[in-house]
Image (cartoon, coloured by chain):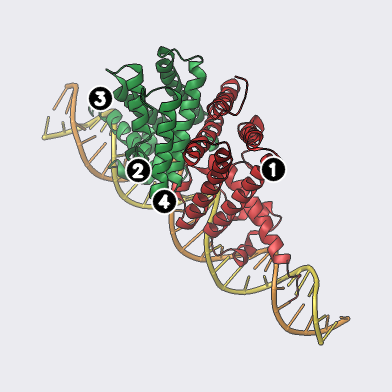
Chain colours: A red, B green, C orange, D yellow
Amino acid sequence: MRYDTEHKQKTREKVVHAAARAIRIDGPERIGVAAVMAEAGLTHGGFYAHFASKDELVSAAIEHMFEQSRARVVHETEGRGPVEGLIAYIDFYLSKKHRDARGAGCPMAALSSDLPRLSESSREQFAAGARRLTVTLGEKLAALDHVDAEAAARSMVAELVGALSLSRVETDAKRSDAILSASRHQLKQRFHLEVRA
Amino acid sequence: MRYDTEHKQKTREKVVHAAARAIRIDGPERIGVAAVMAEAGLTHGGFYAHFASKDELVSAAIEHMFEQSRARVVHETEGRGPVEGLIAYIDFYLSKKHRDARGAGCPMAALSSDLPRLSESSREQFAAGARRLTVTLGEKLAALDHVDAEAAARSMVAELVGALSLSRVETDAKRSDAILSASRHQLKQRFHLEVRA
DNA sequence: TTTATAATATGATGATCATCATACAAACGG
DNA sequence: CCGTTTGTATGATGATCATCATATTATAAA
């Protein structure tokens, strides 16, 4: 063993990180292996020492995105009760900052329509990540004695993802903001997350 | 003028129709000019007699999709009062049939994440279509004396699009159905569209 | 310092694709 | 029924890209 044991793995992680960003911005079809490698500070040649195919890179990148997402949920909710945690997460998710940071944000909003076109393994990876987020939010709702917390969480995630996606579709800045704020308000109201109206 | 006056336009429409279907299924990047032309019963050569570029085709296809969507709204709501109309539209939108017909369904659910990557003109075309749908639903809600019908419509569209998108992401059939049904129920409840609980 | 080898780079290869140039076909007016 | 013109087809061209074969570099151990 000549190189440091972790050297290759570190490199792999850099590539996956660069891919996760590029894929969310340019889409899984449009990114090129060479461009991603370049972004990670390498050339395209070594690629197949790390991944069996481009598809495997996409799959790894999706996994990475959901790890980042999960970390974000934890970051927004830890040390807070269920109500405050949910409010913080909704406010983060439907913020302008999140909307404008496509390369780093929620994979569901960034890739939902690409998904049905991806490989089986990527789709499975993705579906599992989506389920985990729903379950996590469902637990918070359950702690608030919601009747059917699981269904409520599904509905909440749907509105979050839909509103963020549509806010990115809307070309007019004011209207885009309005999409975010409408859903922020409605979500808090319908799940009784604000004491005052 | 040798050919029938409408001949070329008929052909153009066939191509746009084929493109609208192919784009929703395979995405704007993955479809090939030659494949779309073949689907319309032609060869790739004549393409540039109809469109200045692939991009123009995509733009025309998006316009076509929103026309289809609009027709669908009319079909579900005409001859019905606002409550029944909204219920019918929600039930259609969040149906398994719609979920499984990606090539013919709502462009927002089919393309939302592709959108930020498209040309300015396609984006504008798309945003306008999304606005029109929101306005139409907003009018129904306004007829029901909703406080802020516009914001309510935004929230409703967000949940519709999000739920449909996520139901297509979910690989497990039962869970996918559950996503649709959770939002069907929640939407009707929160907008007071069902008299009984 | 040398050497073996793991990690990365250079440079094909073949495939796919948008675009275009040119050739053929269809159909209406004469 | 013939010639002109509009619409469509055939067949390049150049670009981009995934993948792979081979060369080069870096570094841990001897």
Q: Earlier in the sequence, mark 4 or mark 3?
A: 3
Q: Is residue A95 left or right of residue B194?
A: right
Cα distance in 3D space between marks 3 and 2 = 38 Å
Residue at x 62% of width, y 24% of height: A195
Q: Image quadrant of residue B168? A: top left
> Upstream in the sequence, badge 3 or badge 2?
3
Q: In terms of sequence position, does the residue under pointer 2 or pointer 4 come before the other?
A: 2
The reply to whether label 2 and label 4 mark residues of one chain is: yes
Report, in whole angstroms, how far the alpha carbon at label 2 lies from the one at label 4. Answer: 13 Å
Residue receiving disc 3: B5
Q: Quadrant of residue A41?
A: bottom right
Q: Is residue C6 left or right of residue B102?
A: right
Where residue A78 is drawn, which disc sits there?
A: 1
Report the amino acid beneath label 2.
Answer: Asp
Q: Chain of mark 1?
A: A
Q: Residues within 10 Å of mark 1 (few under 14, many from 20)?
A: few
Q: Count residues near mark 2 (Cα–Cα under 10 Å), then give few for <14, some for 14-19, many for 20+.
A: few
Q: Position of residue A18 (x, y in %)?
A: 65, 51
The answer to whether marks 3 and 1 mark residues whose Cβ atoms lie closer than 8 Å is: no
Give yes or no for contact between labels 3 and 2 (Cβ–Cβ under 8 Å).
no
> Circle 3: is it few (<14), some (14-19), or many (20+) Cα within 10 Å?
few
Mark yes or no: residue B110 visible: no
Q: Which mark is residue B172?
A: 4
C29 or A180, nearer to the observer: A180
What is the three-letter code of the residue carrying label 3?
Thr
User: Disc 4 to disc 1, how far (Cα)?
Assistant: 30 Å
For the residues beneath circles 4 and 1, the answer to whether they share a chain is: no
Could you tell me how far apart the alpha carbons at marks 1 and 2 are, in whole angstroms?
38 Å
Can you say whether B134 is above or below A77 in the image?
Answer: above
Q: CA distance from mark 3 to mark 1?
A: 68 Å
